[in-house]
Image (tube, rainbow, N blue to C red):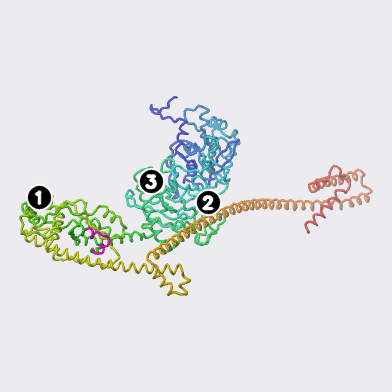
């Protein structure tokens, strides 16, 4: 391969195999078709219509793309067939979709191996070919693109330069003559436009075409996949776990949502695609605002709504410069395996992101990740708000995703000016072709009137997120009590014996404890404040030691081990519902670091005590303490020396509030003793005695209240059983109770508790059975309604197909009627013309007949006339008459095909008689 140079430096070469390599970026065939549609949509072409069709040329299935845009000259066509040339710019407010100058090459070579382009721009007509087959046959080392240019007089502009290109096109394309090339140029309607023909279409491993042209004659579809179970629907790679939208396998459905605001009509296989304003065709439409930090205070509008056609097709529609990049991208709560976010569609135009080369995804940058996360949050807000709003308005209705919906607005596109117009509500049926003159609103009844402006400068969302305010209010109410709890809760506990401790922790004595309201959000603060218990501390180690010895001197020789609550008991309490209020005095919580080092010293010393030291101290003291006095003191010491505290759970019950009776003076004095240093051990002992007495009084008071409440609970339970007994009896024997109510009541009172309980359980079982039957009937009703809806939809679709066929036949009949009418008008004109000619011939014939007698009279009266002159005169008149009869005979032959002119004698008046009969018949026809 001879390398080309420029300025002594080699130029990079492009291998022909790159055409196929470049096309592999399109993993989905419709993305390749979209590239060719984009070229017609871009502002430098600005086509109003593009026709996409399938045709057969020389037994080759071909795809054709024809537009009525501005066309191209030979230079622009050469750039289009080359790589990387893109000089598109914004024109008339339309932003170009093309970015890289690679769309036609990658798209056309993805669909087929060969493509030919016909284009005309009003001044010239050009033909260019991009063919892999041509490059393979000729063993080309570079990509060659033959181009031929014609003038408007259908002559080749530069024959010497175009001779080789013309030969290559005629040899390796589907068109073998120059006349066929010109015929394809004539197929472009108007003076400007472009026509692309692609052949040698890609096939699968079974040698079948990649597209299905037979299932729907007005659509191009991707066939169903084949597997070991038969056929299954086509699915894109990213939708393997989703319900596939129709736009994934139907080109007609994909083209209908290809542009956010369509300004070009797409005619697919002879039928116009019903494009839609995606952001206007939703139900319950609301708009939100996204303010990304990387856009420097710019706002991006997001439109949310519910899909009215199919609730299973939901997600985010992400557009870039009006062109669809990603469809039905699920975010936020839609990613979870539940019904949250079902049916919600979001629309955003991400002009700040960069699409990939195939325009089917965005570059996975930090900006893209932030955008997806923000879209998930915004979609969650919309879903929660709509759910809350609909539940408040219709609490007994179906879920919001199950409600049958209609679009909030109706928009239609004018077929003449291609502007979008908003229609009033209530218009369900529109004609096949709609124009601005049909608009009910007189303000927009003219094609020259611009479209309605949109609120591009949206600053705030169009809906209020009330559910967030409610959540904040709930959280605020929960946090209102946390400062009070941190400052006021001071919990004391004393256990005299293991028996008392077990009785204290029994379920029946829960009501005897103080009822404190503690919100869930303040659990951490409660747990941090609970370790503030009565501890004896001193800044000096000696004082701690003496204090420790003296306080233990009045303790009887008992074991230091005290009953402790099991972990399972408290775990079960902690796992209760959120509505229960819980106070936890932690047993195994991690101690907080304290700035008071003396407390730790006291704890360390107390841990080293053993049973022998206590016995020695007890023998040295002459006044032994009672067992009831020693154990609480021992418990207080253990609470002051251990890093683990006993745990206590207080649960809120639906009974009367019990006031917390804790002596304020004792608490203040106790707090002072915790923070300060006692003067003597006697004062400490007196203080502990006083506290012990107070605790015993409180315990007795709580026990008495607990007993009273237990009795009340038993009374209420007995009343409840009696009421249930009466209710069950009335339900089981309502006829007897109607006639003799007193007997039923007495009989119920005489029943035993076991019988009443059995009847009550039987009633509960029957109620559960009835509930199951109701739920089964409800499910059956739902399935029946779904089946009925499916059947009605199928019937509607069948009727729509039948009506479509009827309308098509009606159109054909209308066309035939117009053709016959035009033919009748032509025949009427010919008839009138022939009638005029017959009148003229009749007049001439009458004149000739009138001149014959005069000539005979002149011949008889003239005696001096020359015989030769008379003979010449009669001969001249007879020749004129004969020629006239010949002409009349030819005219009559056009009217009477059965007339044989060869057998007619023009010397007699046979022709005159036939002419007279024809004239009379025509007069009769005209009169009738």
| Real-space CA distance between mark 3 and mark 1, rounded to the nearest whole angstrom | 80 Å
Which residue is painted at 9% across and 51% down in the image?
613
Q: Would you name the residue on which mark 3 appears? A: 353
Q: Which mark is residue 612?
A: 1
User: In the picture, residue 4 is in which quadrant?
Assistant: top left
Quick one: SS at disc 3?
loop
The stretch drawn in magenta includes residue 381: no
* 116 relative to 727 in the view: left or right: right
* Mark pair 2, 3: CA separation: 29 Å
Q: Is residue 457 visible?
A: no
**Disc 2 on helix, strand or loop?**
loop
Q: Nearer the viewer, residue 422 or 766?
A: 766
Q: Which mark is residue 274?
A: 2
Q: Nearer the viewer, mark 1 or mark 2?
A: 1
Instruction: Decide: few, some or many residues near mark 1? Use Cα within 10 Å; few <14, some 14-19, many ≥20.
Output: few
Q: Write the start and end of the magenta stretch as one range.
A: 500-512
Q: Quadrant of the C terminus?
A: bottom right
Reading the chain from its start, which is encountered first: label 2 or label 3? 2
Judge left or right: residue 240 versus residue 567.
right
* Residue farthest top in this picture: 2
Q: Position of residue 661 (x, y in %)?
A: 19, 66
């Amino acid at each position: 391969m001879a390398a080309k140079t420029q300025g002594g430096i080699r130029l990079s070469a492009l291998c022909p195999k790159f055409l196929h390599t470049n096309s592999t970026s399109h993993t989905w065939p419709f993305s390749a078709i979209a590239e060719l549609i984009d070229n017609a949509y871009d502002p430098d072409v600005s086509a109003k219509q593009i026709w996409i069709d399938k045709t057969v040329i020389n037994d080759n299935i071909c795809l054709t793309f024809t537009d009525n845009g501005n066309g191209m000259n030979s230079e622009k066509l050469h750039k289009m067939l080359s790589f990387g040339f893109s000089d598109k710019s914004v024109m008339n407010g339309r932003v170009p979709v093309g970015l890289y100058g690679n769309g036609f090459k990658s798209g056309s070579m993805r669909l087929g191996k060969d493509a030919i382009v016909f284009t005309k721009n009003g001044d010239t007509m050009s033909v260019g070919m991009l063919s892999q087959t041509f490059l393979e046959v000729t063993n080309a080392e570079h990509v060659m693109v033959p181009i031929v240019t014609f003038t408007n007089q259908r002559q080749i502009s530069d024959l010497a330069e175009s001779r080789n290109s013309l030969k290559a096109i005629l040899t390796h394309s589907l068109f073998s003559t120059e006349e066929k090339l010109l015929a394809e140029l004539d197929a472009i309607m108007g003076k400007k436009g472009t026509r692309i023909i692609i052949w040698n279409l890609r096939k699968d491993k079974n040698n079948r075409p990649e597209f299905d042209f037979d299932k729907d004659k007005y659509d191009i579809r991707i066939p169903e996949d084949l597997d070991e179970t038969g056929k299954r629907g086509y699915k894109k790679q990213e939708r393997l776990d989703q319900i596939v939208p129709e736009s994934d396998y139907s080109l007609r459905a994909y083209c209908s949502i290809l542009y956010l605001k369509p300004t070009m009509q797409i005619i697919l296989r002879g039928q116009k695609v019903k494009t839609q304003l995606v952001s206007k065709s939703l139900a319950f439409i609301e708009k939100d605002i996204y303010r990304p930090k990387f856009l420097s205070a710019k706002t991006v509008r997001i439109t949310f709504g519910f899909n009215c056609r199919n609730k299973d097709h939901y997600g985010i529609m992400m557009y870039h410069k009006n062109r669809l990049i990603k469809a039905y991208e699920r975010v936020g709560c839609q990613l979870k395996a539940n019904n949250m976010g079902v049916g919600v569609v979001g629309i955003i135009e991400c002009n700040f992101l960069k699409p990939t080369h195939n325009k089917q995804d965005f570059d996975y940058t930090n900006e893209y990740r932030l955008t997806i996360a923000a879209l998930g949050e915004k979609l969650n807000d919309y879903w929660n708000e709509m759910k809350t709003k609909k539940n408040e308005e219709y609490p007994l209705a179906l879920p919001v995703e199950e409600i049958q919906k209609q679009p909030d607005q109706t928009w239609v596109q004018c077929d003449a000016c291609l502007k979008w117009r908003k229609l009033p509500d209530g218009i369900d049926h529109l004609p096949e072709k709609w124009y601005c003159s049909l608009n009910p609103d007189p303000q927009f009844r003219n094609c020259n009137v611009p479209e309605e402006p949109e609120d591009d400068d949206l600053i705030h969302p169009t809906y209020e997120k009330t559910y967030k305010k409610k959540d904040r209010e709930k959280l605020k109410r929960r946090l209102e009590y946390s400062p009070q709890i941190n400052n006021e809760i001071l919990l004391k506990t004393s256990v005299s014996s293991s028996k008392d401790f077990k009785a204290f922790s029994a379920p029946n004595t829960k009501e005897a404890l103080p009822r404190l309201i503690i919100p869930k959000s303040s659990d951490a603060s409660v747990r941090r404040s609970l370790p503030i218990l009565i501890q004896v501390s001193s800044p000096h180690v000696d004082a701690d030691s003496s204090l420790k010895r003296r306080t233990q001197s009045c303790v009887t020789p008992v074991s230091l081990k005290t009953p402790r609550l099991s972990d399972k008991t408290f775990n079960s309490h902690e796992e209760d519902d959120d509505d229960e209020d819980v106070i936890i005095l932690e047993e195994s919580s991690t101690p907080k670091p304290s700035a008071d080092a003396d407390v730790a010293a006291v704890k360390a010393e107390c841990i080293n005590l053993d049973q022998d030291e206590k016995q020695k101290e007890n023998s040295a003291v002459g006044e032994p303490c009672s067992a009831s006095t020693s154990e609480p003191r021992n418990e207080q010491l253990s609470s002051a020396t251990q890093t683990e505290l006993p745990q206590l759970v207080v649960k809120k019950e639906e009974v009367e509030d019990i006031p917390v009776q804790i002596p304020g003076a004792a608490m203040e004095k106790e707090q002072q003793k915790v923070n300060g240093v006692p003067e003597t051990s006697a004062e400490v002992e007196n203080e502990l005695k006083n506290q012990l007495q107070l605790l015993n009084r409180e315990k007795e008071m709580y026990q008495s209240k607990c007993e009273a409440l237990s009795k009340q609970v038993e009374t209420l339970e007995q009343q409840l059983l009696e009421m249930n007994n009466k209710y069950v009896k009335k339900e089981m024997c309502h006829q007897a109770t109607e006639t003799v109510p007193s007997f039923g009541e007495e009989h119920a009172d005489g029943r035993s508790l076991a019988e009443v309980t059995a009847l009550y359980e039987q009633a509960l079982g029957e109620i559960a059975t009835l509930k199951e039957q109701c739920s089964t009937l409800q499910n059956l009703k739902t399935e029946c309604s779904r089946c009925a809806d499916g059947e009605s939809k199928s019937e509607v679709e069948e009727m729509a197909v039948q009506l479509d066929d009827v309308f098509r036949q009606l159109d054909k009949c209308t066309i035939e009627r117009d053709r016959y009418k035009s033919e009748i008008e032509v025949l009427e004109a010919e008839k009138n013309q022939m009638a005029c000619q017959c009148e003229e011939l009749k007049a001439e014939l009458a004149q000739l007949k009138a001149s014959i007698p005069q000539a005979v009279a002149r011949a008889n009266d003239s005696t001096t006339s020359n015989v030769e002159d008379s003979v010449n005169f009669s001969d001249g008149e007879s020749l004129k008459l004969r020629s006239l009869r010949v002409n009349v005979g030819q005219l009559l032959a056009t009217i009477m095909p059965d007339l044989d002119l060869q057998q007619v004698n023009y010397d007699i008046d046979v022709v005159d008689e036939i002419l007279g009969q024809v004239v009379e018949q025509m007069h009769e026809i005209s009169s009738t």
